[in-house]
Amino acid sequence: MRKLTYYISLSIDGFIAGPDDEVDFFPGSDEYMAWMAGDYGDALPGAFREQFGLAGVAPTRFDTVVMGRRTYDPALQLGVTSPYPHLRQYVSRAASSSPTPR
């Protein structure tokens, strides 16, 4: 049986987004982002992986991402149909377009 790892950003009071789905309240210091890229680079969207020199690096910790539609839609609105191109992607509710398989 495969191991399931649940990895998510969460505020101390248990929220994963603000009242209007904003996520800008999560800290993103240089030190934190360096740790994130080093230890959890697989969990970064493709655009951030490029910034940290991880584009083309095979995932080592995760192979699949499950996104809620409200998480997926902002990327889709920017024309990004595959925010995690290095992982298998699933959207938990129907969206106007589904992720492109890798």
Image (cartoon, rainbow, N blue to C red):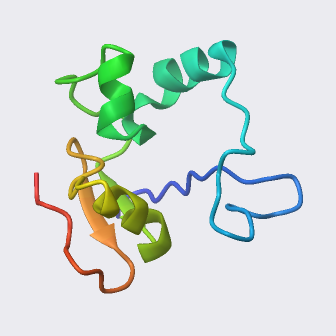
Can you give x and y, in whole percent of width and height, for residue 79 in the image?
23, 55
Q: Is residue 19 visible?
A: yes
Quick one: quadrant of the N terminus? bottom left
Asked whether 90 or 76 is in front, the reply is 76
Can you give x and y, in whole percent of width and height, for residue 72 in the image?
39, 65
Where 49 falls versus 8 (above or below)? above
Q: Residue at x 67, y 13 (%)?
A: 31
The quarter holding residue 61 reads top left
Residue at the outermost front position: 78
Asked whether 50 or 43 is in front, the reply is 50
Q: Total of numbered circles in the picture?
A: 0
Q: Is residue 28 left or right of residue 58?
A: right
Q: Residue at x 22, y 41 (%)?
A: 86
Can you give x and y, in whole percent of width and height, for residue 54 in the image?
30, 20
Can you give x and y, in whole percent of width and height, for residue 2 in the image?
35, 59
Q: Residue at x 30, y 54 (%)?
A: 78
Residue at the outermost right position: 13
The quarter holding residue 67 reads bottom left
Q: Is residue 60 visible?
A: no
Q: Is residue 59 left or right of residue 8?
A: left
Q: Residue at x 16, y 24 (%)?
A: 56
